[in-house]
Structure formats: structure tokens, C-alpha cells
């Protein structure tokens, strides 16, 4: 059984990548298992300045999922480049995915450029889809022109392949996806979180201080799968599938729908060994389904 | 941190809505009192963080209050059933601080972690005085367990139905106890009051809604004088670092 | 404890309405319990002609939810008006919600007009959001102009209040909602199903014959709640909440977010007594939360 | 239809991946053989439809094959546990049709409902011949139960490892049995073949992915000569109404 795959020309030992925001900068998981089993790691979304993010509560529970309104807490690109990435390199030897966010075109460009110069950064993941920050984030990802504009600006400076991470909170995901492809994106990651909300019934007000939050976890899988499928039908560039993945079967389903690699997000939070366990379960599930090479099934259902 | 299945060996009701759950399993990752476990409850997506009230070589004692659907569901777990826990989370109390007569102040379900803390303080030759605060007599739990440690235990109830009427501060006033440090866990209002009122240093245990409990999601951040901390990894903060907003 | 509420001027004994497509025309449930306990009933989406709908499989399971691609199977408006509604009237004495669908503006108008003339029809529910039919259904609900156009055309002929049922598969629900309100809608129902998909891993192809399907059930609740809240913030007309409701607490949460009544859909399918059990549980949950009159909490969280 | 909690009183493995589950509870809503129950399985959103293989005043016997995650999870349900069922779904077999020597033909997990059917046919003084079809010897189940009813039972295996080698049609050919009607349940290919090959009338049991199982969702519709039917309410169709596409 061969679980290797490839992403924008770079080989991956396996398709499993912990999703941005659910794996910090790797340090929190290093005592749980040897991270080098992972295909890659997508680091916490990074902005130019350090950010505390939104006030708490920032987390709410849902049936089969969760809301977060962290709001891009991160130490800022300088600290990430100077401290976090070198620290991560000590414990994780493969190229990582640098998740980049911004509140203006300039910020995206600056952060992406700095990140792309770091040796252990394999890919830039352009997060135009964070629903938890005002003026920026998702607003870039819900309009095809904006998404294209930021994509081509970042492409112009990036020394590494640029993967645009799309928001599912749109009427037509393929319109945005195609615009990014045309603007030069090397790949797409879908999906980021859906915009959701919960109330605190005792206090009769929104549970999250930020009012709304990003919905992720088991519940979102069928929506993510549909968007991957629709996008893979019309786009040529590779896709990272993401959203509600918690088993090896989910990974296979996303790859059959067109994903070349798969990110695991919230599942890591409720089971810190999730990504490792999924990787270890891949060969058994592949055998059951008669899959020899994982790359054989990418997009077979299209 | 250890993740594993723990066997429920005791599950009992202490008051109307407070339960004690004792589980058996690997406790090697617990390094200090004041740490917590994160409990998987069937049908609920997120785990529930509960402080370790006591532990030894192979058992962990948890005390929890039913406040919502998750803790309600937990009450139906029977002895003999296994339960998935993340064990040994949080930084725990530092009992090596220089002090001789620490106050240990707990309110409601902030009281449980203070039991093991008090034991540790005694082991380290400190002379803790324990103040545990409740609304009313029927809600009192753990009193005998604290008493049996041989330390002074003051109880307060808001309605005066048992012990000192009022709050922790009334107990201090009435008893005139001397202290040179404090450890506290309880409702936010109490923590704020302690922080602003007591003139000595201390350690304060915080709560926040958590996504993971081990530092992975940044869901539980709060601001301290030394920067941003995550409640799940820095549950207990020195009073001189604490910022209340 | 008072569980009465009101919808577009008509009183409801309680806010619970089985959602369209999950309660047939009432007959399937009549032996399970006395339907007259229900606030109202929304009947299966009706078109001008009789329709078989999509080929099977039409149902797929998801974590915490389901996909359906029934594709508006119904006996056509004539049979509904002449047979189904009179039959329903024998067992259910209150006004019902007539869910109307079409493949053209004309069809919507014709079906709605015929329905609105039936005595036991209390409201017209304009389904501009069915994701399971090509050319029609959802395409009317994802564009503000189309939604407004069909709303005003139907308003012009309807003798009953017109409630527009919106699609959640849009970038900005408030834009569509406001357009409908301006076009004269008397109320809004949100949400219909989200577009989702599952694959059959053994056959390596989409599980549903229709490829995609409408995602409903527990999983969609936080998305529905957010859309209700966002819409209630900007619209004055009453809202029926719908999506993932399975408990009395869910009903209360939706009402606090701005819903005047609440539909229960998929929950009826997995527990045929769901709507009844929810109604019966309302007083107890209200007591726990200190709610005397249900109408007091409509929109309190806004 | 009854909805209720049923007590598992027996749960046993019959072959490598076929299990028998016997539950106790209200069976008053079961009116005919060939009806089914819809089973709630923890963690799965939709129920799983399984035919009633046999029943009496207070027990129901189900036989199921593990084909996916839901049936796999079901195998872990222990005796003594309660399980939520919708009971008495579907129209069931009509055993009052005029016929004397019906064939009862089952393939794989289409066989279970035919056990009670055969009992009913015997009670109504018909003389059924049973043909049960498997892939191979190791997959055979219910043979003894049918045998003990005192009827002729023909077994076929595709690989010839037991009984007649081949399909139901080979059994008919080899044995030269006479028949004037048929009842059948099994894989679609078999049903189609029976429908097009046998010259007598019969009743055919269908399967479809279901949302509810009781007619509420229109998820399971199929076309028949007399219009659209729902598989869940019209599970069994007279052969002259059947349309295969
Ligand atoms: C570090 C830590 C230690 C704790 N120790 C104890 C203890 O020893 N005994 C005890 O009774 N309680 C303790 N709590 C509080 C306990 O976690 C909550 O009461 C519990 O999670 C409520 O779950 P629920 O499903 O009943 O409530 P729900 O309101 O239904 O829960 C919904 C969500 O909100 C979260 N939540 C609700 N209340 C709180 C809260 N106060 N703090 C954090 N998350 C919350 C839940 O974990 C869940 O994710 C502790 C909390 C933290 C953070
Ligand atoms: C009326 C009826 C009677 C049945 N009687 C029996 C029986 O007596 N014994 C037996 O072994 N099987 C029977 N089946 C088939 C049985 O329902 C499926 O094998 C079972 O639902 C598979 O569940 P799973 O979770 O293991 O599979 P999964 O593939 O994981 O299930 C996913 C979803 O697809 C549905 N599904 C999968 N296969 C089928 C199928 N063949 N028919 C309908 N839905 C399906 C499931 O119910 C579930 O909703 C019957 C089906 C129907 C419709
Ligand atoms: C707590 C949390 C924080 C997140 N932070 C980021 C982020 O910084 N950048 C980003 O692109 N996505 C972020 N996401 C989105 C995830 O990377 C992922 O796209 C989403 O959660 C869906 O996957 P899942 O269902 O597997 O969690 C975050 C998700 C969670 C739960
Ligand atoms: C099987 C099925 C059929 C449906 N048919 C219709 C329909 O005909 N018209 C309509 O407006 N909505 C239809 N819906 C959508 C529901 O009315 C409801 O909006 C949706 O399922 C979300 O609610 P829920 O999560 O409670 O199921 C259907 C849903 C299901 C599951
Ligand atoms: S709860 Fe996840 S970082 Fe603290
Ligand atoms: S399964 Fe719902 S109508 Fe048949």
C-alpha cells in the first residue's frame, strides 16, 4: 500500500496535514508523538503584527462540531519567522505550510513574502477566509475579484507555491476558485470554517464574545466534500481537502472527490492523536477498498 | 499528558447536584495539584475540563457540579464503565513558594482541586488554613475530607445556614487568622475580590471555555501582566501577573 | 407557562411546525399521535405538475445529519388542492403552511394562487431554495433580484400571507432577505437545506443518483441560527426558524435569535414523535430558563 | 407502528458476518411476515431497516449482515441492553393469495423474512418449497430452521460447495419442482431474473435507502405499473405491478 502523494510539485509522505489553527506551531503536540509521521503541518494563521485576537469566550460547542472565534491570535510574522519556524524545524524535518492572513493587500503581500523566504516553508497558504476578523480575512474570500487580486499580488512575491484557502460562505465556490486559478494560484485549500452561532440560553445572548464564530468538525464534512467535488470538476490546480475529517475513510472520500492532500483540524483538538491515528489507519482502509496507490484515487469520483 | 481509558470505580452524589467520580488508571502524568483532566462524554463534541481533586498512584478523584447537558449526561455513567480522559493538563499549583501560613480559599466547584493542594502543602510543612465557601448548608461538600487532614477549616455560607455567614472575607475577619500567602479557586467575582483585597501574594486558578485543553487551539487565552497566556496551559497564575478587566 | 405565538397575524397554539418534505401531507403521522397538538404543518413542496422527483438513491447519511435529493416528488397542485388538503383537513383542524415550488415565475404564481384559495391554507411558503432540482428551486433563492421578483409576483395573487423560504447557500443571507421584504413578503423561513454530498467508497462515485443533495439535521443548527440572527437584525417581518431543531432548547434558542415560530424537519424522520415530544417539553424548559411567555423571548438576543 | 425500547435477549453470530438479534417487547403492531423494523444505532443519524425474520407474542428475531459502519456498531450491542426500534413497518407478504405450491426464494440477507413467511404459508395450508441461495457453504444460515418446519428446502451455492451449484434457477431445474406462485427477497439481480423468468405470479420484496421508513420523506420511491410507490410502505409488490428499469 502506497500512501505517498504530491502537492504542487512537492512530494508528501502521506496526505495528512494538521489544519491551521488546530496545531499551533507544532510545539503543543511534540510530546504526544513524533511529528515527523505527518505529511506536513499547517501553522497558525500569521499576520504582520502580533495579535491577541478576540475577547473570550471564543469557543462554543455544537452538535458534532464547534465554533471558534479566536480571531487570529499569533505572535506576528517576525516572531514566527525568527522563533516559531526555527523551533518547529528542530522537531519537524519536512516542509511546512505557512498560513498567511492580513487586513489589507499590503499585509498579505508582506507576510507571504517574508514567510516564503524561510527554508522550511514549503507552501504559502493564503487564508482569505477567516470569518472571525472584521475588515479582512473572509471579506477577501467571498468576492472573486478580491480573491484574485490578493492571489496575484502574493504570487508576484512568493518564492514558494501559493495555495489559496477558500471560504465556504459563498454562493458559488467555483467562481472564486476559478478566479484564483486564473490569478496564478498553485493550489486551493477548501474549506475554512462556516459562519455559525450559538446562544447562551441563561444569559439570553450570543455565547461567543464575537457573536458569530467559525463552525468546524464532523458536521461540516458533506459541505466540504461537495465544494471539493464542484471545484475539482472545473479547476486544474491541486486541492487540499479540509473540513470535518476524522477518519481514514474521510480522507479517502475527499481524495476520491478530487483532493490531493487532506487537512485534519478540529479532530486534533478533541483527540490530540487524531492525525497520527488517521495516518496509521490508511493502509487498512485502502486494503478494504482495493486501493494500491493513494494517488490512483484522486478525483476518481468526478 | 496521558490519553487513555479510565475505569470508573466510584461514582456518588455528594449534594443535590455535585458528584464525585473516582477513576482508575495511569496517573504518572499528574505532576501537581491543581491540574485537570479533559473528559470525553458520549454524544458531545468537546471534552469537559474537570480539576483533579485528589490522586494517588493509580486513582484520580474528580468532583463536578451538574450545570448543563454534558455534566448531566456524565451522571449516568455507571461504575465499571470506562471513560476516555486526557490527564495531567494545566500547570498546577506551585507549592514550593516561600510561605508558612498560606490561606487556601475555595468557592463552590472551585473547592475540589484545593483538597490535594492542602495535602501537598502539609507535606511541605506549610500550615494552611482552609476557607471553603458555599451558598447554603445543603451545598456543603468535602468538609470532612479537609477536616481529616488536621488543618483549620472555616466554612462560610451566604445565607448563614452553616459556619460563618457571608463570604471568605467574613471568615478571615471573624477568625482573625494570620496568613502570608494564598491559593484560590472559585467564582470569578471571588477571585477578583481576593486579588484586590488581600495584601499578600498568591496563586489564582482560572477557568475558560476550552477547545482542546492542551494548548492547541488558542481558544482560552487571557491577558496577564507578562503577556498572553492560555488558561489550559497556565491555569494557575501568580497574583502579581494577574490582570482582571 | 404560555407557549402561544403568532405568525403574520395568525395565532399559533405553539411555535412547532413540522417542516416541508418531512411530514408528507400529514397522513403518514396521523396514527402516531393526534396532529392537532401541532402549531401548524408545512406540507410537501408542491409544483404545477405531478413529479416523481429524482432517481434513487435519494438519501444518504452524514455524521449528525442526512442528505436528501428527493427532487420535489409530489402529486401536483390539482391533486393537492382537491385531495390532499381536504384529507388533511379531516385530521388537522388548524391552518396549514402550503409549501410552493416552481420552475418558472409563472408556475410559482399559478401554484401559489391556487393554494391560497384553499380554506385551510393559512400561509403560502414560497420555496425558492430547493437545491435538488435543476433550473428552478434554489436558483430563484440565490439571487436577490430573482427572489424579489417571484415574491412580488406571488404577493400580487395570494390571498394568504406569503412567507419566503430562503436558501442558506448564499454569501449574504441578509441581502436576499431584505430584497424579499421589500418585495412585499409577509415573513421569511430560514433555512432550507445546505448543499452537500457523499461518495460511495466501494463504487467510487457519488452516493446520490443526483450527485449532490440537501444537507439537514442536527449538524446545520449553528448555521441556521446565525442566519436567523443576522436576518432578524435587519428585517422587520417575522421569521420561521428551521434547521437542525430536535429539542425544546433548540426551539428556545432559535426564538431568542429572532424566530417567531420554528420548523422541525429531519428530526421527525428519525423519531416520528419528535414534534410532539418537543411541544410537550417546552413548558419544562421554559421554567428552567425563567420564561413565562414564549413571545417575550423572540429576538431577545439581538 | 410502535416505537419503543426493546430488550436484547439474544445476540449471536451465525456466520462470519451474519448475526441474529432477538429482542423482547411489544409486537402487536406486526401484522404480517415481510415487515421490517428500523433500528436506532448510537452515533448514527439514520436508523437501519432490518426485516423481521420471525416474531411471536413478545419477541422479534432479526438477522443482519455486517456491510458497513452501522451494522458493525450493532454487533457490539450486548444482551441485556435496550435498543430503540420502530416496529411493524412495511406492508408485508400477502399470504392469502390463491395458490397451493408457492416457491419461496431467498438470496443472502434476503432470506430472513422468508422464515416467518414460510411458517405463515404452512399455517394457511399452502405447500411451500424453499430455495435459499448463497455464495458458498460457509455463508449458509437458517437452513436448519427452515428444515425443521418440515418443508422441502433446496440450497444453492454459487461455487457448488454445498447443495446445488449455481443459482435458484438451477435448483428449480435440477429438482423439477412444481409451483404455482412465488415469494422472493434477495439481491436485485436475482429479483429481476425471477421476475422475467418465472411464468407464474408472485410477490417481490424491495430495498432502498431510507430516510424514515414509514412514508414521511419520499426518500425511497420507486416506479410501479400502478404509479409511484414508497419502498418503505410498499416494500412488497405483486409481480404484475413491478417495473425494473
Ligand atoms: C480548568 C477547569 C477546571 C474545572 N474544574 C471543575 C471542577 O473541578 N468541577 C466542576 O464542577 N467544574 C469544573 N470546571 C467547569 C466545568 O468544566 C464546566 O462546568 C463543564 O464543562 C460544563 O459542562 P456542561 O456540558 O454541563 O455545560 P454546558 O453549558 O452544556 O457546556 C457547553 C460547553 O461550554 C463549556 N463550559 C460550560 N461552562 C464552563 C465553565 N464554567 N468553564 C469552562 N467551560 C465551560 C463546556 O465545557 C462545553 O464545551 C472546570 C473548568 C475548567 C476550565
Ligand atoms: C426494508 C429493508 C429490509 C432489510 N432487511 C435486512 C435484513 O433483514 N438483513 C440485512 O442484513 N439487511 C437488511 N437490509 C439492508 C440493511 O438495511 C443495510 O444493510 C444496512 O442499513 C446497512 O447499514 P450500515 O450502516 O452497515 O451500512 P452503511 O453503508 O454504512 O450505511 C449508510 C447508510 O446507507 C443505508 N444503506 C446501506 N445499505 C443499504 C441497503 N442495502 N438497503 C437500504 N439502506 C442501506 C444505511 O441504512 C445507512 O443509512 C434491509 C433493507 C431494507 C430497506
Ligand atoms: C480553533 C481553530 C482555529 C483556526 N484558525 C485558523 C487559522 O488561523 N487559519 C486558517 O486558515 N484556518 C483556521 N481554522 C480553520 C481550520 O484550519 C479548518 O479550515 C476548519 O476548522 C475546518 O476543518 P475541521 O472541520 O477539520 O476543523 C481554525 C479552526 C479552528 C477550529
Ligand atoms: C427529505 C426532505 C425533503 C424535503 N423537502 C422539502 C420541500 O419539499 N420543500 C421545502 O421547502 N423544504 C424541503 N426540505 C427542507 C426542510 O423543510 C428543512 O428546511 C430542512 O430539512 C432543514 O431543517 P431540518 O434540519 O430540521 O431538517 C426537505 C427536507 C428533507 C430532509
Ligand atoms: S483550550 Fe485550546 S489552547 Fe487552551
Ligand atoms: S423512507 Fe421515508 S418515505 Fe420511505
Image (tube, coloured by chain):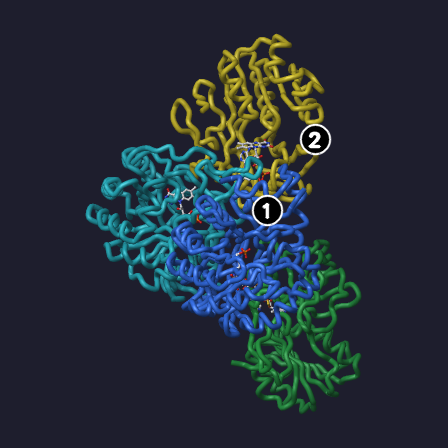
Chain colours: A cyan, B yellow, C blue, D green
Classify D59 as above or below C219: below
For label 1, the SS is loop
Classify B231 as above or below D166: above
Whether residue C192 can be seen here: yes
The residue tagged 2 is: B15
Classify A224 as above or below C235: below
Q: Is mark 1 within 8 Å of ligand 1?
A: no
Tell which of A119 and A57 is nearer to you.
Answer: A57
Tell which of C214 and C44 is nearer to you.
Answer: C44
Q: Residues within 10 Å of mark 1 (few under 14, many from 20)?
A: some
**Quarter of image, res C96:** bottom right
Q: Position of residue D232 (x, y in %)?
A: 62, 70
Give the Cα separation between the discs numbered 1 and 2: 24 Å
Tell which of D229 and C151 is nearer to you.
Answer: C151
**Residue occupying image coordinates x 70% and y 31%:** B14
Q: Is mark 2 within 8 Å of ligand 1?
A: no
Q: Position of residue B135 (x, y in %)?
A: 65, 24
Q: Are marks 1 and 2 on the same chain?
A: yes
Label count reads 2
Of the two numbered discs 1 and 2 on the same chain, state the one appearing first in sequence.
2
Whether residue C204 can be seen here: no
For disc 2, the chain is B
Q: Position of residue D41 (x, y in %)?
A: 62, 57
**Residue occupying image coordinates x 53% and y 57%:** C161
The residue tagged 1 is: B42
Classify C233 as above or below B110: below
For disc 1, the chain is B
| In this rendering, the label closer to the viewer, 1 or 2 | 2
Amino acid at each position: 500500500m502506497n500512501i505517498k502523494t504530491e502537492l504542487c510539485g512537492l512530494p508528501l509522505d502521506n496526505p495528512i496535514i494538521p489544519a491551521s489553527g488546530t496545531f499551533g506551531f507544532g510545539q503543543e503536540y511534540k510530546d504526544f508523538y513524533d511529528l515527523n509521521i505527518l505529511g506536513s503541518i499547517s501553522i497558525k494563521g500569521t499576520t504582520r503584527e502580533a495579535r491577541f485576537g478576540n475577547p473570550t469566550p471564543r469557543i462554543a460547542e455544537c452538535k458534532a462540531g464547534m465554533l471558534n472565534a479566536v480571531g487570529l491570535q499569533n505572535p506576528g510574522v517576525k516572531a514566527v519567522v525568527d522563533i516559531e519556524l526555527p523551533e518547529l524545524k528542530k522537531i519537524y524535518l519536512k516542509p511546512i505550510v505557512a498560513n498567511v492572513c492580513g487586513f489589507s493587500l499590503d499585509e498579505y503581500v508582506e507576510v507571504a513574502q517574508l514567510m516564503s523566504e524561510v527554508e522550511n516553508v514549503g507552501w504559502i497558504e493564503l487564508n482569505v477566509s477567516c470569518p472571525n476578523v472584521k475588515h479582512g480575512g473572509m471579506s477577501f474570500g467571498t468576492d472573486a475579484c478580491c480573491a484574485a487580486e490578493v492571489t496575484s499580488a502574493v504570487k508576484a512575491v512568493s518564492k514558494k507555491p501559493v495555495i489559496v484557502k477558500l471560504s465556504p460562505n459563498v454562493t458559488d465556490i467555483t467562481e472564486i476558485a476559478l478566479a484564483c486559478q486564473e490569478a496564478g494560484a498553485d493550489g486551493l485549500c477548501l474549506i475554512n470554517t462556516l459562519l455559525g452561532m450559538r446562544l447562551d440560553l441563561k444569559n439570553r445572548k450570543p455565547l461567543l464574545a464575537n457573536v458569530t464564530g467559525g463552525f468546524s468538525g464532523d458536521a461540516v464534512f458533506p459541505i466540504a466534500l461537495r465544494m471539493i467535488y464542484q471545484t475539482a470538476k472545473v479547476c486544474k490546480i491541486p486541492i487540499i481537502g479540509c473540513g470535518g475529517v476524522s477518519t481514514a475513510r474521510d480522507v479517502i472520500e475527499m481524495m476520491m472527490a478530487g483532493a490531493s492532500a487532506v487537512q485534519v483540524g478540529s479532530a486534533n483538538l478533541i483527540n490530540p492523536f487524531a492525525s497520527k491515528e488517521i495516518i496509521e489507519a490508511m493502509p487498512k482502509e485502502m486494503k478494504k477498498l482495493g486501493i494500491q496507490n493513494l494517488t490512483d484515487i484522486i478525483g476518481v469520483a468526478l | 499528558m496521558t490519553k487513555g481509558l479510565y475505569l470508573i470505580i466510584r461514582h456518588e452524589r455528594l449534594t443535590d447536584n455535585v458528584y464525585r467520580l473516582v477513576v482508575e488508571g495511569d496517573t504518572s502524568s499528574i505532576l501537581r495539584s491543581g491540574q485537570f483532566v479533559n473528559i470525553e462524554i458520549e454524544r458531545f463534541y468537546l471534552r469537559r475540563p474537570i480539576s483533579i481533586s485528589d490522586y494517588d498512584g493509580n486513582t484520580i478523584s474528580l468532583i463536578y457540579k451538574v450545570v448543563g447537558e454534558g455534566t448531566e449526561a456524565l451522571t449516568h455513567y455507571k461504575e465499571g464503565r470506562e471513560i476516555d480522559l486526557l490527564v495531567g493538563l494545566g500547570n498546577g499549583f506551585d507549592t514550593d513558594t516561600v510561605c508558612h501560613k498560606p490561606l487556601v480559599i475555595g468557592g463552590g466547584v472551585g473547592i475540589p482541586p484545593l483538597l490535594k493542594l492542602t495535602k501537598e502543602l502539609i507535606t511541605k510543612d506549610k500550615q494552611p488554613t482552609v476557607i471553603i465557601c458555599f451558598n447554603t448548608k445543603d451545598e456543603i461538600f468535602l468538609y470532612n475530607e479537609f477536616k481529616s487532614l488536621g488543618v483549620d477549616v472555616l466554612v462560610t455560607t451566604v445565607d448563614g445556614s452553616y459556619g460563618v455567614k457571608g463570604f471568605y472575607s467574613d471568615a478571615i475577619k471573624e477568625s482573625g487568622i494570620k496568613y502570608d500567602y494564598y491559593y484560590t479557586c472559585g467564582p470569578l467575582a471571588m477571585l477578583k475580590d481576593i486579588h484586590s483585597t488581600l495584601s499578600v501574594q498568591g496563586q489564582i486558578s482560572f477557568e475558560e471555555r476550552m477547545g482542546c485543553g492542551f494548548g492547541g487551539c488558542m481558544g482560552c487565552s487571557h491577558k496577564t501582566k507578562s503577556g498572553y497566556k492560555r488558561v489550559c496551559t497556565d491555569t494557575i497564575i501568580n497574583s502579581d501577573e494577574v490582570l482582571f478587566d
